[in-house]
Amino acid sequence: MPVIGFTSTRATAVVTRDTRAAAEARRLLETVSGAGTASTDTAALLLSEVVSNAVRHAEGATIKMVVVGDQARGTVTCAVFDSTADMGRGPRRGDAPLDELETGRGLDILDALADRWGVTMVGAHGKWVWFRVTVHERVPALAA
């Protein structure tokens, strides 16, 4: 994973928009927030969902990711940029009730588990999809 930059509480990477992107995003998250707790597992799940949406629905060869840990607030904010300038409404597949659909539930999961989330459009260049979660443990600094 080509990490563009990092500090003790922030990591940025650009990855190829392919099936490995979600795993690379989780590794990036671990560099800032650690791993193995319920709250960091929630952040990893949400980041995987946002990245998977970008892989599946966006255009362009790469996805940019930023993960920021705020030690004072005990939060982690993740943002994913893709070069598609809209939030398409991907189809939900399946004839089952809403809670049993096979696809199309990623944003519902984001809405249910993130403290806050949103989409920031960057004109015709693309968009950032971001979310913030509280990590109940202190956010550790990166090892030097």
Image (tube, rainbow, N blue to C red):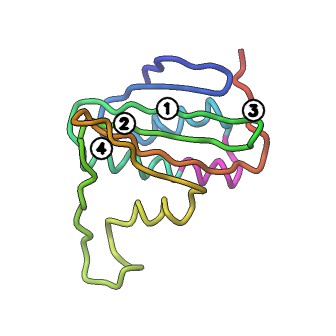
Badge 2 is on which residue?
A: 81
Quarter residue 113 falls in = bottom right
Q: Residue at x 34, y 33 (%)?
A: 63
CA–CA distance in space, label 1 to label 3: 17 Å
What is the spatial separation of the Cα atoms under label 2 and label 1, in whole angstroms? 9 Å
Q: Which residue is mark 1?
A: 66
Q: CA distance from mark 4 to mark 1?
A: 16 Å
Residue 65's spot in the image, x, y percent? 44, 33
Which amino acid type corresponds to the residue marked 2 in the rendered image? Phe
- Residue tagged 4: 55
Secondary structure mostly taken by the magenta-highlighted segment of the chain: helix
Stretch of the chain drawn in magenta: 35-44
Sequence-wise, the earlier of marks 3 and 4 is 4
Q: Secondary structure at mark 3?
A: loop
**Real-space Cα separation, disc 3 to disc 4, in angstroms:** 29 Å
The amino acid at mark 4 is Val
Q: In which quadrant is the C terminus drawn? A: top right
Earlier-in-chain disc, 3 versus 2? 2
Contact (CB < 8 A) between labels 2 and 1?
yes
Marks 2 and 4, Cα distance to the nearest angstrom? 11 Å
What secondary structure is marked by label 1?
Answer: strand
Percent coordinates x, y for residue 48 in the rendering: 45, 48
Q: Which label sits on residue 140?
A: 3
User: Which residue: 68% across, 37% down?
Assistant: 34
